[in-house]
Image (spheres, helix red, strand yellow):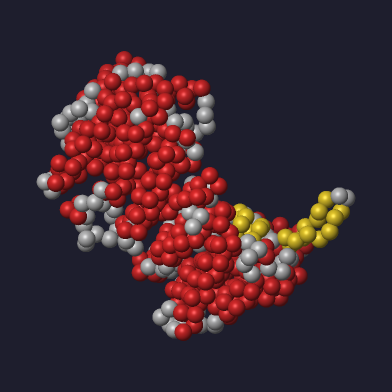
Amino acid sequence: PAQDRDVMKNHLVELMCTVPPQIQVQLGESISLIAASDFPSQWDNLLPDLISRLDNRDWSVVNGVLVTANSIFKRFRYVQRSDALYKDILYVLHRFQEPLTELFKAINAQLDAFTAGNNVAELRPRLAALRTICRIFYSLNYQDLPEYFEDHMEEWMAGFAKHLEYVNPHLEDSDEENEPGPIDVLQVAVIQNLYLYANKDEEPFLPYLAKFTTLVWNLLLRVSQLPKHDALATTGIRFLSSLVGKLMHRELFQEEATLREIFARIVIPNLMIREVDEERFEDNPQEFILSDMEGSDTESRRKCAQELLRAMCRQFEPQTTQICSEHVSQMLASFHADAANQWRNKDVAIHLMLGISIKTESAQYGVSQVNEGVNVMEFFSSHVLTELQEPNMTVRPMVKATSIKFVSIFRNQFTKQHLEALLPLLIAHLGSPDVVVHTYAAAAMEKILTCKVDSGTQGGTISKVPKIGRAELNPVLNQLFTGLFSIVDNVDLDENEYVMKCIMRASNVARDDLLQVVQVVLEKLTAALARVAKNPKNPQYNHYLFESIAVLIRSVCTIDAAHTTAFENFLFPPFQDVLQKEVAE
């Protein structure tokens, strides 16, 4: 009943402020969930209730209120503009912008005193509050720069600058490698606000830009290679990239010495493979693939460093290409002098080439335009192909993965003859014991099988045909399926959607030629279906599995209907099993 809802809403904020922190978090989430439907039109006392508790002396209460407000205001981000959205934003701004600014200024004023006294117990909750305030600032400024924040720009920017310069050894845990500290997460939130303003090209922000560029630059030079600083490094690099790539900020970076310093002190250190990357490659390949695979959304240091390179090329292509070529030559010379110990340098060299070579790219179609100052094919022949031709799969597996990624990304630049020669090499890498390597090989082949080339004009329309069609695939079809199903059949490996997608794509290209392998392929797919039916956990894998079965049925039964009975005998038992057990996935 509406009356009960009102009673509950009227007491939720008060209750949240009186319970232990663990329960406080749950109540804050409850407030956010109700606010998603009722605020502000049906809960007009929520904001006054939250604001009235911002001056509480108990910092657990203040932080609870801020976290709750932050989760409510997040809905102002990443949504399309509308009159209703702006009405809600204005409602919040008129009530919350001033108290938020005053609290921001008050906490900043307190930092110096507590820092001087090494009062960590008082500093931690205040830094946590500042971090949440920064996230609220992000939400309230996401759509447009509000007039109030424009009028109080100096106070906010002074605070942000102070946070970026803030150092306190007493708040840093030298034994912690993975979890960022309170200063780290605050600085990440500050840079995200700067990135927001820089991307909007807000005129009131421009006078502060040079100073913040220097501050973020200095921060990146101090950041360690430890995982706990990954977010800080990637956020800082993204901010610099957003500036370097714009003509209006050209003067900040146009000196050759500046560009060289960016290479030496930011790009290369963040492209270099770390011990934690090697561990992830071996022990958590899914996470490594997610952060490194072409087209994935996850940000990593290496991806951000490459994006910085591309931004530099947009404004300073000749200088960037020249400096990068020098570093690539040095890295490769170091590798050739001591391949066993300097293999990481070759990996960096390939990533540098990926960074400066690509001008236009899409995840679906690969690279469509390259830097004319870089000879991609010569680099491939001299340094990438040799890595793929190494028969020992245990030699430099991370460089092998990068080399396969290179082939996948530049698939459009390879001729049909190149790709035909590459197929056996990629198939060989399906036998690699490293999950990342055989996954990249399967993903690369799947993408190559989608590549098309112009075949002439028919009726005023450009006709396209596959670079690798049925005729080109046929000689390696048996080896391809053998390699792919050796991965699918290995119960010690997780269900690999990239491998199953490659099976689907290869089946679709082979079509009539599937008759020569239909018995084996059907047995393998049926066995895979029986396994996943017991414990379905990867929807993408399951999707490509059923697509593969569908392609097989369509291709084979169209040619020879006599195979229909064999399909029924193989597929009906697992299908019935799925239906009887009511497997929902």
Residue found at the far right of this picture: 459
Check the image and report above or below for 515 versus 392. above
Depth check, front residue: 434 or 82: 82
Image coordinates of residue 429 in percent, x first then y, are: 55, 74
Residue at 38% x, 27% y: name it. Answer: 151
Check the image and report above or below for 105 versus 178. above
Image coordinates of residue 310 in percent, x first then y, are: 54, 57
- Position of residue 454 in the picture relative to residue 75 (left or right): right
- Position of residue 300 in the picture relative to residue 55 (left or right): right
Residue 380 makes an appearance in the image: yes
Residue at 52% x, 26% y: name it. Answer: 82
Residue at 19% x, 55% y: name it. Answer: 169
Q: Please state the total of marks drawn on the protein image.
A: 0
- Position of residue 55 in the picture relative to residue 336 (left or right): left
Image coordinates of residue 27 in percent, x first then y, are: 26, 32
Depth check, front residue: 320 or 344: 320
Q: Quadrant of residue 54?
A: top left
Check the image and report above or below for 50 versus 419. above
Residue at 27% x, 34% y: name it. Answer: 104
Residue found at the far bottom of this picture: 337
Residue 533 makes an appearance in the image: no
- Position of residue 234 in the picture relative to residue 413 (left or right): left
